[in-house]
Amino acid sequence: MKMKIILPIVLIILIGLTGLVYAVGDFGRGYEYGQISINLDKGWNLVSVWAIRDAFASNSFVKKQIQEKDIKAIFFYDRYNKYYIQAFPNNEESKFQKFLESKGDDLKEHGAYVNSAMWVYSDKEQTISSWTTDAPYYIKNVGLNAGWNFLAITPELKGMSYNDFKGDCTIEKICDYQRNNWECVDANNLGTNKVADTDSDLWKGIIIKVSSDCSLGSNGITPPPELPEDSYISNQCTMTSPLGCDDNKISVATGISLVLRNGAGEDITVSSVNIVNCGIDSTSQPVADGGTATITIPTCTPVLVAGNKFNGAITVTYIKTSGGTFSHTSTGTLVGSVI
């Protein structure tokens, strides 16, 4: 009879990632990180799955190594089957095998796994360290599933706002867990909160709730400024489906006004309109199917100057009123001369 050897789940998660990341190193950051330090609070911590694999790994002595670091429990979240898998002290191998069977083989499925975070319970406040020369994935190679997802805070995200890496995701809420408390940011404040201000925030984890399957991605380098215009240009306002922009006005006296048309096939409620280089209007405004609504931001920052060219991206957040609970977005641009 052949013997079937089953590795403990904590060994699979914490050590097995090494080969996976090396195998796809071309898709990661690809440079030497050196020593990684992770600060743990006493109690539960969200920690990068990738970063802690070497901190605890010691072949068959994994369990002993974890206990010596006063780690009392480790749990991994299965985003496909929507439940926790205990990795330590009890190994739920059958659940983890089900997770692996549910996980697809494409790049973004691997990215979501390598760049995930897990729960670690520390019996004391401490700093754990590891040394590594490989790297996790670029954020653009991470896919999310509808609902809650666990994400590690990698150096790529330092200094970014949550808006900077949301890609094509409609994010409903982002939360982190520090000092035994949840701290959450809703969809309307993604641009005003940074993911990580200092190195001490790196290699921890956050959870992200999205309305549907999507892909993360940073905005990257913006194009150079357009050449200056010497003459008056006609205003142009465009929006992505299902919204349209019927008319607009850019004025020193009255600010910026947009006439938005609802082509969603049902009634909607506009919850916010953000115009880059002007400001945000968060007045809730219902718009009937096929109808229009006028949105006005009376005062822009920076201040509008008559005769100057205005160029700003538009993001409209809305909810479908026929029983819908999820926020949706339509984006566009506004270009024209200030009068």
Image: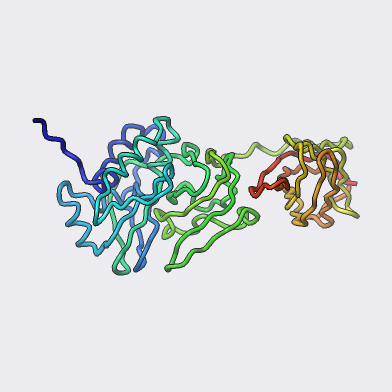
Query: Which residue is painted at 88% across and 45% down in the image?
Result: 249
- The answer to whether 241 appears left or right of 82 in the picture is right
Work out whether 122 lies above or below 269: below
Residue 228 in picture, x, y percent from top left? 78, 38
Work out whether 320 lies above or below 108: below
Q: Quadrant of the N terminus?
A: top left
Residue 301 in picture, x, y percent from top left? 76, 56
The chosen color scheme is rainbow
Q: Quadrant of residue 98?
A: top left
Query: Which residue is painted at 36% across and 62% down in the image?
Result: 39
Q: State the residue in front, 328 or 265.
A: 265
Total marks drawn? Answer: 0
Query: Which residue is painted at 53% across and 40% down in the image?
Result: 217
Q: Quadrant of residue 71?
A: bottom left
Q: State the residue in front, 221 or 82.
A: 82
Work out whether 136 lies above or below 255: above
Residue 101 in picture, x, y percent from top left? 35, 35
- The answer to whether 233 appears left or right of 57 in the picture is right
Q: State the residue in front, 312 or 34.
A: 312
Residue 242 in picture, x, y percent from top left? 74, 36
- The answer to whether 270 appears left or right of 202 in the picture is right
Work out whether 26 lies above or below 278: above
